Amino acid sequence: AENHMKPALIHPKPEKYDFTAADEIVAFAQKHKMKVRGHTLVWHNQTPDWFFQEADGSAASRETLLARLKSHIDTVLSRYKGKVYCWDVVNEAVADSGDEPMRDSKWLRQVGPDFLAKAFEFAHAADPDAILFYNDYNECNEPKRTHIYNLVRDLRAHGVPVHGIGMQGHWGLEGPSADEIRKTIETYASLGVMVQITELDISVYAWGDKRTDLRRPTPEQLERQAQRYGEIFAIFREYKDVITGVTLWGAADDLTWKDNFPVPGRKDWPLLFDEQQQPKLAFWRILP
Ligand code: GLA
């Protein structure tokens, strides 16, 4: 559902939900017998400020924040019960580097580290059939891979209903390596959870390539990208017993967040379909 189920869009004000776009996506999916991944309930980004504030503007207490979280999760999950089969319950709670595993956030500061357990428990109570994910990026890097592993291991050891780990998969032409991807999938699968690739896209630019003048991708870029997609999907097939889904972030190259990341305003072509919605080399390369 890309951005359309994030708190900022679906719950802009305390008393106001806006389900317009999310409902359209879900109705389209129902009509075409497609599955929908829900994204996301707890995140440090794209969550409105009012969530974290009392009426006088001071920081909301733990009780206020947990009550809001429960009500938000109840409302959203009840609406899509039986229609959204899984949820990224918590997104990006682990730090990118350093010894401290948790990312600093208002959730962590104002609720405490059990905000994750609470979110998963609220979600499970609201829709016991939904498959619940912890989702993050740079999941192939150490120490982040291990921090995510430890987090999910500890939550599950305390009976918290975490059913899967989402690897976003905003990957590049050069990395992560095939070995690192395999190792990450195996590490997470060893917890007994399912693994999904949740936001895959692969820039046509190598990391050091700062060109900003291309109007269309070069044949070399498209070929390298196709090789990379082919390599990655071959790995996914090796692990088809644990990988239960692969989702891309975006449908086609006409609309992608990579146009503004990591180089603002530079057109990129990271997906399987081109700007005219036609299959690219990479699309043909991922077929079995
Ligand atoms: C992240 C988030 C997504 C989305 C993408 C691309 O990794 O999980 O919600 O914002 O980046 O912008």
Image (cartoon, rainbow, N blue to C red):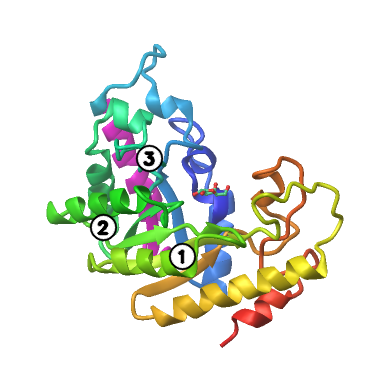
Residue at the image point whose x is 25% and y is 61% from the top? 128
Indicate whether 236 appears above or below 147: below
The spot of residue 212 in percent (x, y) is 81, 46
The residues colored magenta run 64-89
Question: Label 3 CB, ligand 1: below 8 Å?
Answer: no
User: Residue at label 3?
Assistant: 95
Indicate whether 167 appears above or below 272: above
Mark 1 falls on what kind of element? strand
User: Residue at label 2?
Assistant: 162
User: Residue at label 1?
Assistant: 197
> Residue type at mark 1?
Ile
The answer, for residue 83, to whether it is visible in the render is no
Q: Is residue 191 left or right of residue 43?
A: left
Mark 3 falls on what kind of element? loop
Of callouts 2 and 3, the N-terminal one: 3
From the viewer's side, name the closer residue of 13 and 256.
Answer: 256
Q: Is residue 240 left or right of residue 216?
A: left
Task: Give neighbour class at mark 3: few <14, some 14-19, many 20+ (Cα, 10 Å).
Answer: some
Of callouts 1 and 3, the N-terminal one: 3
Q: Residue 204 lies in what quarter of the image?
A: bottom right
Indicate whether 53 appears above or below 287: above
| Cα distance between the residues tagged 2 and 3 | 19 Å
The spot of residue 270 in percent (x, y) is 67, 61
